Image: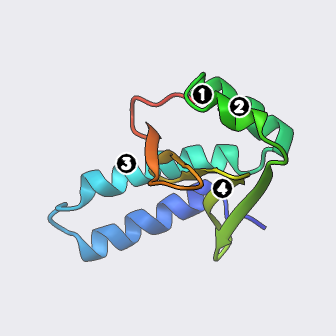
Amino acid sequence: MIKPFEEYEKSVREELSKHDPKGMVYDIVENGLIGKKTLYALFPLRKDDLIEELKEILGDDVKDFWETTPISVRKTLDDDVPQEILLCSYDTIIIDSYGISFKPEHGVAKKLRKFDKHFVL
């Protein structure tokens, strides 16, 4: 069972207040929480719904990717907390707390969308 986002967020904030009383990493953690909330929203989607949502988010950025078949979806949990979603064919779309990246079969991953306060799902 996936840990509810609110429970995850509370535990992160408690740890942050213990270990970062001066708020030196506050912005990094805040952006991570924004992204984690987006990841939580995408995580329960079924494969077809996830693909449709990503097509809407990414537009024509990776239109060739959608034409390859088959596409498999892998979702990773760590202690019942969503960590990443991979859409794999020859190339891979990676969704994690920091955004959406595209990694071609032969090449380097490129960030397509950053999850921050300006990102709307």
Q: Amino acid at mark 4?
A: Ile
Closer to the chain start, of discs 4 and 1, is 1
Q: Amino acid at mark 3?
A: Asn
Instruction: Count neighbours of disc 3 (C-alpha within 10 A) and say few if under 14, some if 14 to 19, many if 20 or more.
Output: some
Indicate the colouring scheme: rainbow
Left or right: 118 with respect to 2?
Answer: left
Q: Amino acid at mark 1?
A: Ile
89 or 34, which lies in front? 89
CA–CA distance in space, label 4 to label 2: 13 Å
83 or 106, which lies in front? 106
Percent x, y for residue 25? 23, 61
Instruction: Count neighbours of disc 2 (C-alpha within 10 A) and say few if under 14, some if 14 to 19, many if 20 or more.
Output: some
Occupied quadrant, residue 23: bottom left
Instruction: Count neighbours of disc 1 (C-alpha within 10 A) and say few if under 14, some if 14 to 19, many if 20 or more.
Output: some
Percent x, y for residue 87? 70, 51
In the image as oriented, which residue stretches furthest toward the front? 106
- Residue tagged 3: 31
How many marks the image carries: the answer is 4
State the residue at coordinates (66%, 24%). 56
State the residue at coordinates (65%, 28%). 63
Closer to the chain start, of discs 4 and 2, is 2
- Residue tagged 2: 53
Q: Secondary structure at mark 4?
A: strand
- Residue tagged 1: 57
CA–CA distance in space, label 3 to label 1: 19 Å
Q: Are marks 2 and 1 in contact (CB under 8 Å)?
A: yes
Percent x, y for residue 74? 74, 60
Left or right: 12 with respect to 3?
Answer: left
Q: Secondary structure at mark 1?
A: helix
- Residue tagged 4: 85
Mark 3 or 1: in front is: 1
49 or 88, which lies in front? 88
